[in-house]
Amino acid sequence: MKVAQPFKINLLQLKEYGIIVEIKEDVVHVTGLTNCMTGQLVNLGESARGVIVGFDSEYVLVLLVTNPRGIKPGDKAISSIEDFKIPVGDGFLGRRVNALAQPIDGGGHIKQSAHYPIFGRAPSVLERIPLAQVLETGTKVIDMMKPVGKGQRMLIIGDRMTGKTTICVDAILNQLGKNVVCVYCGIGKAEAALNRVIGTFDNGHIWDYGIVVAAKASDPMGQQYLTPYVAASIGEYFMREKRADVLVVFDDFTKHAWAWRQISLLLERAPGRDAYPGDIFYIHSQLVERACKLNNQKGGGSMTHLPIVETLQGDVAGYIPSNTISMTDGQIYTNTTLFGEGFKPAIDMGLSVSRIGNRVQWPAIRGMTKMLQLEFVRFKELERLTRIKAGVSADIEKRLRKGKILEELLKQDQNTPVPMEDQVIILFALQNGLLNDIEPAAVQSRLQNLIRQVRRNRPDLIQSLIEKKALTEDIKEGLHEQLVRFSDTAVQNQG
Ligand SMILES: Nc1ncnc2c1ncn2[C@@H]1O[C@H](COP(=O)(O)OP(=O)(O)OP(=O)(O)O)[C@@H](O)[C@H]1O
Ligand SMILES: [Mg+2]
């Protein structure tokens, strides 16, 4: 007997038509869509686009992601019963796009290789493996003491104007020639601030491996809300299909939370703590969960997230700061006081943590930085205690001097990331007494001269350091020899 085949409907080809009933700023009420789900794209009127963000008893609530101009009640709304997907592909490298993955750099059409859902699913536990490699940020304090692993979520948190963006931009600059795809996601930034970042990227020649996804403060609220998802999806393409290591910077989550708060108020959802909607934790954790290190069956790629969050007067217990601290694997805390004192990058080592620990570090760095943080924190304490007292003992004087030298060593100008091998040379010089008995003000120039000398005389040493990542006997011997030679020339120059 012949069994009747079940009747199959290809939902992807189905379209549904509804009608716009009301437009409330960025939220459009639509009736007639009976088979839709949240996160789906809806075409409104002639050219407007929206994404479904909720339902009430009568309407589907659609958040506009384009300008509301040109749509009016009574217009048609068309939904195509599928997830909101954006084009992705290699063509995005070197480009600047908006929240719909459309170019905003005046360049031509971007060739796409695939479509990825913007609200993509985070990889499961089985698809992931523990982090084992370091993402070299080029910021000495971070690489030496709070290393970031490839696939980690490291929060950059601090007050306004404390160098948060600079730390992340430097991390992107430092990936030059390191085969890491970098996505900078600007959320609700002023045009001038965004242009400053792009100018730095131009100077740093990052466009072979960099992508900017941005919604400015003047762009529709819907776009500001969507940008981080789009940035994560573009990154996911490179991680999954190109097996690449990807770095995504979200600048910043505070503005993203503001955008979602504003949208939620328009949606008439009950405001909760600090007037944020109840699902703000979910919104951010869903994003950062997408960071991972994939196992070898899945290609072995990784995606590292650096979300930025702003604090008010150093209050890390605020709603968004405490949420984001709990959903990431560590935080770099920047501090106004340190910034004011001229310790830049103004990273507060006491409050910063990396929950991945130092296992991802180069063994060479790990071996020499064990006591560094403790020494620095003790020095800061001592400095605070002795500030008001004149005439401290010779021993204390000596310790203060040592601490100041360490402080000078950790300072770093903006947009000058320090390669890992240079950091090894710096630590080696510190450990072997090259910086004893010099003025703290001379530390930076002395180290620069040393690095220049080693790079000129022993490029082979640098190369083997990069390959081995550890201080083998050969490398140690070579570095010792260079230190001796450097001290001799320094003495001669003085004489
Ligand atoms: N390491 C540094 N050395 C010297 N200047 C720096 C350093 N880091 C940041 N700055 C300067 O400090 C200012 C603030 O930096 P940045 O924009 O990175 O801070 P932010 O915390 O991201 O600020 P915002 O809250 O406005 O986003 C900038 O003018 C920048 O040039
Ligand atoms: Mg900033």
Image (cartoon, rainbow, N blue to C red):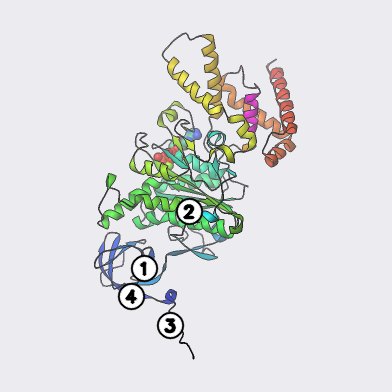
Which residues make up the magenta segment?
424-436
Q: Distance between the residues labelled 3 and 4?
A: 23 Å
Of circles 3 and 2, the one toward us is 3
- Determine which residue is flagged by label 1: 42
Q: Is residue 365 magenta?
A: no
Local packing at callout 2 (Cα closer than 10 Å; few below 14, some 14-19, many 20+) is many
Q: What element carries label 3?
A: loop
Badge number at residue 290: 2
> Quick one: label 3 or label 2, which is nearer the N terminus?
3
Q: Is residue 95 visible?
A: no
Q: Indicate the amino acid at tag 1.
A: Val
Q: Distance between the residues labelled 2 and 1?
A: 25 Å
Q: Is mark 2 on a helix, strand or loop?
A: loop
- Determine which residue is flagged by label 3: 7
In the visual, does 480 lie left or right of 418? right
Q: Indicate the amino acid at tag 2.
A: Arg
Majority secondary structure in the magenta region: helix
> Quick one: label 3 or label 1, which is nearer the N terminus?
3
